[in-house]
Amino acid sequence: MTADDPTRPLRVGLIGLGVISRFYAAALAEVPGVELAAVCDLRDEALAPYRDRVPCHTGHRELLAAGGLDAAVVNVPNDAHAEVCGDLVAAGLPVCVEKPLATRLADGRALVRAARERGVVLFTAFHRRYNANALELLESVPPGVSIESVVVRYLEKIEEHAGADAWYLDADRCGGGCVADNGPNAFDTVRQFLGPVELAGAEVVRDAAGTDRQATVTLTAASGAGGRVELDWSYEGECKDVTLRLTDGSVHSADMLDGYPEFKQSLWHEYRGIVADFARAVRAGEDRAEGGLAALELVAEIYRGEQRPATDPTTTGAAR
């Protein structure tokens, strides 16, 4: 549905057909009120499965020039986010961009400024925000009881998750290592439970090539509640979970992969959540730029001050 015709589905273009694109394509086929209207990729072999379904383009500017879209999903390598999103925003087209918003803070700030000046929806996709197990945990916090601390673990073997998208392993193209790539999802999960947070400290471990492969990040909320994020790109297997300590002394946790035993299986419902939420934001004309920029600000601050000693409010009796 669109503002000019509420009975017509939102026509969405999908730019970039890498490993995550199948989740977007499925969600655009399953979520009511939206439809996949065009695709774009530099590679002819990536476009081949869509040739008989929707218009196919080899550049995002070509896709823009063809018209006929109400919004676009940007799923290109991280280092191309700023350019592609910038062109879409300049054209007045609402954007859902895979995290991170950009690889450089200055670019992220410029995108947000441009989107707000033009009144264009700029929405960063944090798929764990829609994880059913994490949402159930959030909703289970009893009335009158506050969260004292949140620990989010995001552990995986990056080589297994990157698949054919080798750019993930290039720090220049990715924007860094585990802090830049997995960090935004984990930081956003902490913010989902605690609200806005500030960096308290970070410990980062780099490999021989200088890429950050492990990190422990501590955060604090205005309430005094603490957050800790544990990141690992070299973990044998996969672990994505959230643990809460409440002010009544109880501890509760959610395994974001529980019930989804197949590789990346949880992403199917999480990306349906992204597409549905993005469509709501577009229809309402909401300003959704803050989340993507907040995560990018944390990434940049961690990289600027890796040597600063960390204090961990999750173990020091955070204020209630």
Image (cartoon, rainbow, N blue to C red):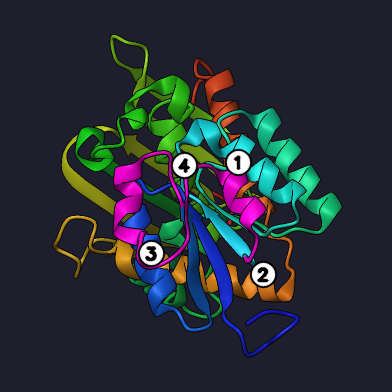
Q: Are marks 3 and 4 in contact (CB under 8 Å)?
A: no
Q: Which mark is residue 25?
A: 3
Q: Is residue 275 above or below residue 43?
A: below
Q: CA distance from mark 1 to mark 2?
A: 18 Å
Which portion, as a residue range, is magenta? 40-68
Q: Which residue is mark 2?
A: 282
Q: Please state which amino acid type lies under the numbered disc 3.
A: Ala
Q: Please state which amino acid type lies under the numbered disc 4.
A: Val
Quadrant of res 155: top left
Q: Which residue is mark 1?
A: 84
Q: CA distance from mark 4 to mark 2?
A: 21 Å
Name the element at disc 3. helix
Residue at point 14%, 61% (across, down): 262
Quadrant of res 137: bottom left
Seen from the viewer's position, the closer of residues 295 and 284 is: 284
Name the element at disc 1. helix
Q: Which residue is mark 4?
A: 76
Residue at point 39%, 70% (across, down): 27
Of callouts 1 and 3, which one flags the residue occurring earlier in the amino acid sequence? 3
Q: Position of residue 256 (x, y in %)?
A: 29, 61
